[in-house]
Image (spheres, rainbow, N blue to C red):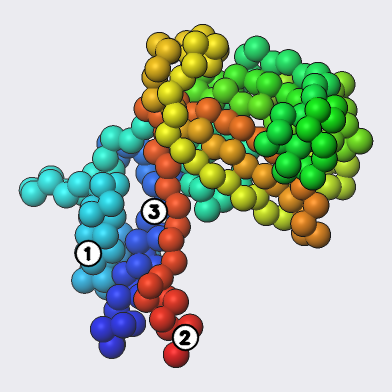
Amino acid sequence: MSARAHSSLRHRIAERLRERLLTGELPAGAQLPSEPELARELGVSRSSLRAAIALLEADGLLQRIHGSGTFVTDQPLLRNDLSRNFGVSEMVAAAGLRPGTAEAHAGLEPAPAEIAAAFAIAPGTPVSALRRVRTADGRPVVDSTDWCLPEVLDPAELATLGSGSIYDALAAQDILIHHGVASISPTVASRETARRLRVRPGSLLLTLFQVDSTILGEVVLVSLEHHLADAFRVSVYRRGPGEIADHQL
């Protein structure tokens, strides 16, 4: 086997294991099966498996303890994989926790400048807005606001969502999200956001601003989410440079 093929194999094995970690199939503190057992399960050699485990250990996801085995490291409450576009409730449920909603309010409001720009409408144009505090086993973890055009979902329709997914509400209207473009930045909690999330003002947040579009590029949803920084581990699958180089050959 060439060095390039061996490198590609260990990364594929690592991704299979990483998916189990991100979905909670292998929870924090769990011990991995022995190397021979796991290698047989995955259908790979022990040397390739060890190389894959080394990658995950370098990422801080696994820890090898001499004489004891390999363990999943303690992780935050929730894992947010930015390479996938899914709702907060699905993310909470994937962690084995009960999704919930508090302080939900839907209404018609003038579009702020940034929201208007995303929809290509004039600032101040009425848009439907849904504000919710999303909870995991009763703990507030995300303060979110979703905006859409009233002809897509009106405030009354948004008000019925509860803890439900706005993506499901759009799908019920035969509107399917093809892709989302998100930006994420560290921020601190304002007094009002801190109250809603039950933390101190100035607490560290991860703020995500996302614009969701159909396959035709029509913007149908804009979202702003303030995530409690200490409740999440954010991950993203990054390609290359090796894979990119392979495609250029």
x, y percent for residue 56: 28, 55
**Labelled disc at residue 149:** none
Q: To which residue does mark 2 refer?
A: 248
Crowding near the residue tagged with mark 3, few <14, some 14–19, many ≥20 C-alpha atoms within 10 Å: some
Q: To which residue does mark 1 refer?
A: 50
x, y percent for residue 37: 28, 60
Amino acid at circle 1: Arg
Left or right: 116 as drawn, with respect to 238: right
Quarter residue 14 falls in = bottom left
CA distance for labels 1 and 2: 29 Å
Q: Is residue 230 above or below residue 102?
A: below
Amino acid at circle 3: Arg
Quarter residue 224 falls in = top right
N-terminal label among 3 and 1: 3
Q: Residue at x 80, y 21 (%)?
A: 109
N-terminal label among 3 and 2: 3
CA distance for labels 3 and 1: 14 Å
Left or right: 150 as drawn, with respect to 203: right
Q: To which residue does mark 3 refer?
A: 18
Q: Residue at x 54, y 44 (%)?
A: 183
SS at badge 3:
helix
SS at badge 1:
helix
Left or right: 119 as drawn, with respect to 88: right
Q: Check the picture and name the quadrant holding the N terminus.
A: bottom left
Between residues 114 and 207, which one lies in front from this camera angle?
114
Between residues 232 and 248, which one lies in front from this camera angle?
248
x, y percent for residue 24: 43, 41
